[in-house]
Image (cartoon, rainbow, N blue to C red):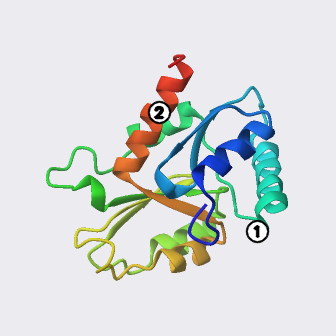
Amino acid sequence: MGGHGIIRMDALRDLYESLQLREPRTYVQSGNVVFLTAEPHLGELAERIETGIERRFGFRPAVVLRTAREMSDVVARNPFAEREGVEPAKLLVTFLTGTPAATDRERTLAMNTGPEEMWMEEREIYVYFPNGFSKARLSMAAVEKGLRVAGTGRNWNSVRKLLEMARRLEAGG
């Protein structure tokens, strides 16, 4: 959900339960929630969650949803997985709310990324920041603006932890 509005994670779990989402579990103070649902239309579900947050907390964030299977695919597609020396805490995956238009994608991929390396899938962007996020030349705000699609970024450690939580929840634990 980004840093635009702060919600306590216990309050966020309560909201998800009130929306009939089962066993919501949060991960750190990040807005990440892993839950069970039979809802097949994730776009409609995201809108329902956004509306619930707006009604209860007074602001409307862009909610980005991925299934456990999609998260598994994100991990499997990591373009930096085979490279030695890549530090997980310096690898960012930005999850987009939709698929950018081809022209926006091409223009964004042509950006001068400096020492940072950027790869893009349909709804995810992988960026490696070899000097860390604080010293980056690449602006993720500029990337998002160029794509004209909202997104939220998580470092690789968080991505893997969220996948682990989703798998455990699906397995009944």
Residue type, mark 2 in image? Met
Q: Any mark on residue 128, and which?
A: none
Name the residue that disc number 1 marks. Answer: 59
Residue drawn where x is 54% and y is 25% of the image:
169
Going from N to C along the chain, the mark reached first, 1 or 2, is 1
Residue 123 horizontal/vertical position (percent): 58, 53
Please give left or right for residue 151 compared with residue 173 in the image.
right
Farthest residue in the left direction? 85
Residue drawn where x is 51% and y is 17% of the image:
171
Residue 56 horizontal/vertical position (percent): 80, 58
Residue 57 horizontal/vertical position (percent): 76, 63
Name the residue that disc number 2 marks. Answer: 165
Farthest residue in the top direction? 172
Residue drawn where x is 74% and y is 37% of the image:
17
Q: Is residue 103 visible?
A: yes
122 vs 143: above or below: above
59 vs 168: above or below: below
The foreground one among 85 and 101 is 85
Please give left or right for residue 123 compared with residue 43 in the image.
left
Image quarter of residue 137: bottom left
